[in-house]
Amino acid sequence: MAPSSSHRTGTVKVDSGELGLALDRRSEVPLYAQLAGSLRSQIESGALPVGARLPSTRELAEVLEVHRKTVVQAFQALEAEGWVEAGVGQGTFVRRPGGRPAPDGGTGSAFPWEEVGPSNPTRDEDLREFVLRQAPREDSVRFTGATPDPALFPADEFRGILDEVLRTEGVHALDYGPAAGLLSLREWLAARLSAKGIAATADQVLIVNGSQQGMDLVARTLVEPGGRVLVEEPSYSNGFRLFQSYGAQIDGVGTDEDGLDPEALRSALAKGPAQLLYVMPIFQNPTGAVLAPERIDPILETAAEHQLAILEDHFDADLVYEGEDPEPIRRRDTRGQVILLGTFSKILFPGLRLGWLLLPPPLVERFVQIKQMADLSSGLLVQHAMDLYCRRGLLDRHLERVRATNRSRLAALSAALEREMPEGVTWRSPRGGMTFWMTLPAEIDSLALLQTARRLGVEFSPGSLFFPNGGGARHLRLCYVRETEERIRTGVARLAEAVREEMARGREEPARPFV
């Protein structure tokens, strides 16, 4: 049945009374996810008590004027998370996730941790992430996490470095280190940045436990609860979620194939002040875009006009596969308004948890104090080892191996997509980084596609994960650097088959709502 308006509200009878449900067809959030989120809210509030029988999928579909498959998907999502359970021939009933007792449970009920502490602003009420928590097939090709391939880790080489550090430094390498980090490593980083045209001194470098801690320190130091943080749209989800966890209001700023749009930044700031702009100008996650050089000055000037601090994240900026190294924003910063964030995790081993911040001089003391309060200091043994590894040229040698391998895998991915993908799917191959961004035909939602793809044995990240305020339904991200060329070709063939299935389903069901 075709919808008569963009909003649809329906009332259905359940054991505990009447249940009001509303769907917004203009929303970027898929209808099944809206319905699942609404039902979950009713369960949490007690409007749908434990043991209550949900209306049938046919009844809900008729009342809400949606395809029955939409309701089935919503019920499957709730069942996957443990909110409901289905009995063959009996219907679907409310239960608590993981058998957790209801909030009014009697003696012996679990401690109500969900009621302790501040509310969690990052909780995803529309269930966009539920599919990511499902167990994949054993042979699945996984185009998911943006992390390096363990097969390329120089474990034996690094073990030798660790042994040497322990021989030469002895127990001193196992002690606490300076809060700012090992001076020798900071000097090496400052020299490397300076060689790239980025003014830096060792005093400005702060060693952190991976780039995620670097972002956390920025949030603790510069972002106030209720303050506004601007992020690229789409953006790295663990970045904007972290800022949300500190009570920040997150607003997206438009991007295109040339990175952050300066006009979109001006428009965002015209709506009100912001405390921070979080941006990845080099091989942006998830799009892989590189910021056009002619956009750097307008971005810096607009930020200066509005006293807007900039956090520039170089999470995979070293992974250049063709052409010259892209220009960082920080290179042109003459006002000291840009904080530069980098990491060893994406080019060596993620488990090292070692990254760095390049801070404007007025911020150094504040950040060192916050870092000391957070964890006293980063591990000294690992810093000594990384310093020695870098100074011997082993990091650059390893980087060349990684770049060569990733370059071949990117070429394999691009060729397979050209060969396998049906017309209507579009993409733009990046020239570096770890991520590959794709756009689907209008009738396909990437969350629905992911369920089909999982069944066929391929994983990817749906685009909606990267939009802080809704959107991205027609996009998906592929991370290809952990898979071999052969498995990349297999994965693309499976993904193309899933796309064709979803396209065929759309043709067979022309009145099917966009889910």
Image (cartoon, grey):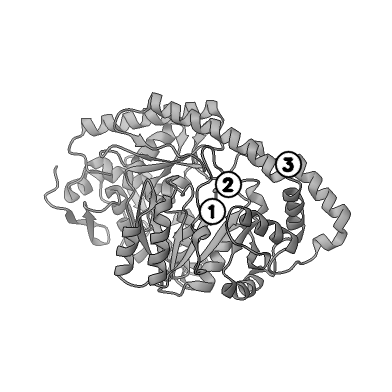
116 up-or-down from 182: above or below: below
Callout 2, which amino acid?
Answer: Asp
User: Which label number is shown at residue 314?
Assistant: 1
Q: What element does badge 2 sit on?
A: loop
Callout 3, which amino acid?
Answer: Ala
C-beta proximity under 8 Å, tags 1 and 2: yes
387 up-or-down from 421: above or below: below
From where the camera sits, is residue 113 visible?
Answer: yes
Other-residue count near label 1 (Cα within 10 Å), few / some / many at <14 / 14–19 / ≥20: many
Callout 1, which amino acid?
Answer: His
Q: Position of residue 360 (x, y in %)?
A: 56, 69
C-beta proximity under 8 Å, tags 1 and 3: no
User: Whole-Å distance between the Cαs marked 1 and 3?
Assistant: 24 Å
Q: What element does badge 3 sit on?
A: helix
Residue toward you, 279 or 479: 279
Sequence-wise, the earlier of marks 1 and 3 is 3
Sequence-wise, the earlier of marks 3 and 2 is 3
- With 182 as the anchor, is 429 left or right in this view? left
Give the residue at mark 3: 155
Q: Position of residue 117 (x, y in %)?
A: 49, 73
Q: What element does badge 1 sit on?
A: strand
Give the residue at mark 2: 318
Which corner quadrant of the image does residue 446 belong to? top left
